[in-house]
Amino acid sequence: MPRLALYALIVCVLAVTAAVVSFVQGSLLGIVWVLIAGLSSNMVWYYVRRHRMTASSADAA
């Protein structure tokens, strides 16, 4: 797994945790954490997919 994908995955897990804690405490700030979690999960998929594409094109060449 690429390093940037790993960092984005860590951010995603921490953002989900922060969202749960915020909602449990009754704060609507959890909505922002959910949006950050969505963004970081998309970043994880992008970096993993980009890594797979470059690895497969390197194997084909």
Image (tube, rainbow, N blue to C red):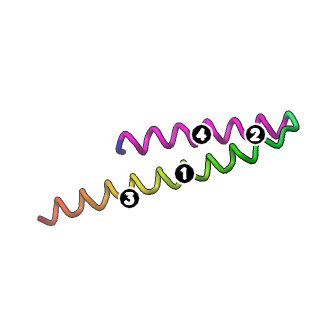
Residue 18 magenta-highlighted: yes
Q: Residue at x 49, y 42 (%)?
A: 8
**47 with respect to 57 (left or right):** right
Per the image, the residue denoted by label 3 is 49
Ranked by sequence position, the earlier of labels 1 and 2 is: 2
Q: Which residues are magenta?
A: 3-24
**20 with respect to 9 (left or right):** right
Per the image, the residue denoted by label 1 is 41
| Amino acid type indicated by mark 4 | Val
Per the image, the residue denoted by label 2 is 20
Ranked by sequence position, the earlier of labels 3 and 4 is: 4
Picture quarter containing residue 61? bottom left
Q: Considering the numbered disc 2 on the image, is that residue within a helix, a strand or a loop?
A: helix
Ranked by sequence position, the earlier of labels 2 and 4 is: 4
Quarter in which the N terminus is drawn = top left
Ranked by sequence position, the earlier of labels 1 and 4 is: 4
Ranked by sequence position, the earlier of labels 3 and 1 is: 1
- What whole-number distance in Å separates the C-alpha atoms at marks 1 and 2? 16 Å
Question: In the rendered picture of this protein, how many numbered marks are placed on residues?
Answer: 4
